[in-house]
Amino acid sequence: MGPRLSRKAVQIENWATDTLLRANLIAACPDHGYMRLRFNHAALDYAHALAEHSPFPGISAGRAREAIDEVLDGLSDDCPDCD
């Protein structure tokens, strides 16, 4: 089991996930609900722009962009249950 995240870290991660959904860069697997990448460069640019213009309250635009990238780093194109 990984390290326990602080409440604020979880909130930032949830905000980043919502931002990625809004940018259509990720989508839930229709069968299992896991988030999967729908990678395209325009959507990534849009997600970064959203993060920079509307960062999570109390963090900088740069940190907001990093939060987006951190969530993306934890995702893949495949659902782990769709084998």
Image: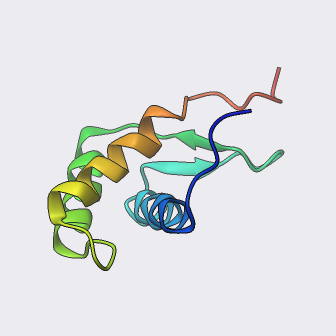
User: Could you say which quadrant of the image residue 51 lies in?
Assistant: bottom left
User: Could you say which quadrant of the image residue 73 lies in?
Assistant: top left
Q: Is residue 20 above or below residue 40?
A: below
Q: Is residue 30 left or right of residue 35?
A: right
Q: Is residue 70 left or right of residue 75?
A: left
Which quadrant of the figure contains the C terminus? top right
In this rendered view, identify the residue nearer to me: 22 or 65: 65
Q: Is residue 80 above or below residue 30?
A: above
In this rendered view, identify the residue nearer to me: 66 or 1: 1
Q: Which residue is pictured at 28% across the width and 48% down the height?
A: 66
Image location (x, y in percent) of residue 37: 50, 38
Image location (x, y in percent) of residue 28: 66, 51
Q: Residue furthest top?
A: 83
Image location (x, y in percent) of residue 69: 34, 42
Give the tally of numbered discs: 0
User: How is the structure coloured here?
Assistant: rainbow
User: Could you say which quadrant of the image residue 58 lies in?
Assistant: bottom left
Q: Is residue 4 left or right of residue 32?
A: left
Q: Residue furthest bottom?
A: 57
Image location (x, y in percent) of residue 6: 55, 60
Q: Which residue is pictured at 74% across the width and 32% down the height?
A: 1
Q: Which residue is pictured at 17% across the width and 73% down the height?
A: 53
Q: Is residue 61 left or right of residue 2?
A: left
Q: Which residue is pictured at 24% across the width and 76% down the height?
A: 54
